[in-house]
Image (tube, helix red, strand yellow):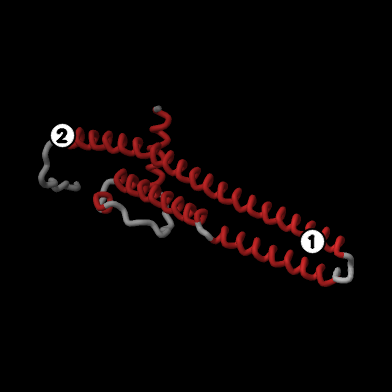
Amino acid sequence: MKVLWAVLVVTLLAGCQAEVEEVARPTPEPELRQATQPWEQALGRFWDYLRWVQTLSNKMQEELLSAQVSQELSMLMEETMREVKAYKEELEAQLGPMTQETHTRLSKELQAAQARLESDMQDVHTRLTQYRNEMRLQAEAFQARLKGWFEPLVQDMQRQWAGLVEKVQSALGPSPTALPVENH
């Protein structure tokens, strides 16, 4: 547990010194916006990072849930079915002089192939929908796990820091105004 705290403290201290490249992130909470202590700033950056991860997760969910993939698959299915029908009509036109028996047999085979193709494409559509739902559930689970793991750590750290600040303030005593320091 001490190692985990040490890693967390080192990470926070490193975050205080990091040059952060601003990416479209939401504004920090009001109480953290005016933070003057380095640990408060690091905590604010940490919360900003968690919000940024949440935003990325939400964007990924939106992309997975978009209807574009389903529309493209439906268009592909329709286009393929049109091509099969056109091929069937072309064959029927070429087979006009052939006997009725051959024509009927070929027509049945083409209908069976068309039905198999439609069934296979519908199966692909169903599997894609299942995969998209599984990805959404995994993204939500990851988001919840990340949030559940970090929130208690941050709350515990806030309680400990508040306790330390109180101890330091009580050890220093009340000082409503700062005393000027003389340099000799």
Report the quarter where the N terminus lies. Answer: top left
Residue in view at x 59 percent, y 50 percent: 126
Between residue 48 and residue 7, name the one nearer to us.
Answer: 48
Residue contact between numbered discs 1 and 2, judged by CB atoms under 8 Å: no
Q: Which residue is mark 2?
A: 170
Q: Which residue is mark 1?
A: 107
Residue 25: assigned label: none
Residue in view at x 86 percent, y 68 percent: 95
Where is residue 13? Give x, y as percent. 38, 42
Q: Answer with the quarter of the image where residue 148 lies.
A: top left
Where is residue 130? Give x, y as percent. 56, 47
Mark 1 or 2, nearer chain start: 1
**Residue 103 left/right relative to 125:** right
Whole-angstrom CA distance, mark 1 to mark 2, is 94 Å
Q: In the image, what residue type sits under mark 2?
A: Ser
Residue in view at x 69 percent, y 63 percent: 81
**Residue 20 left/right relative to 39:** right
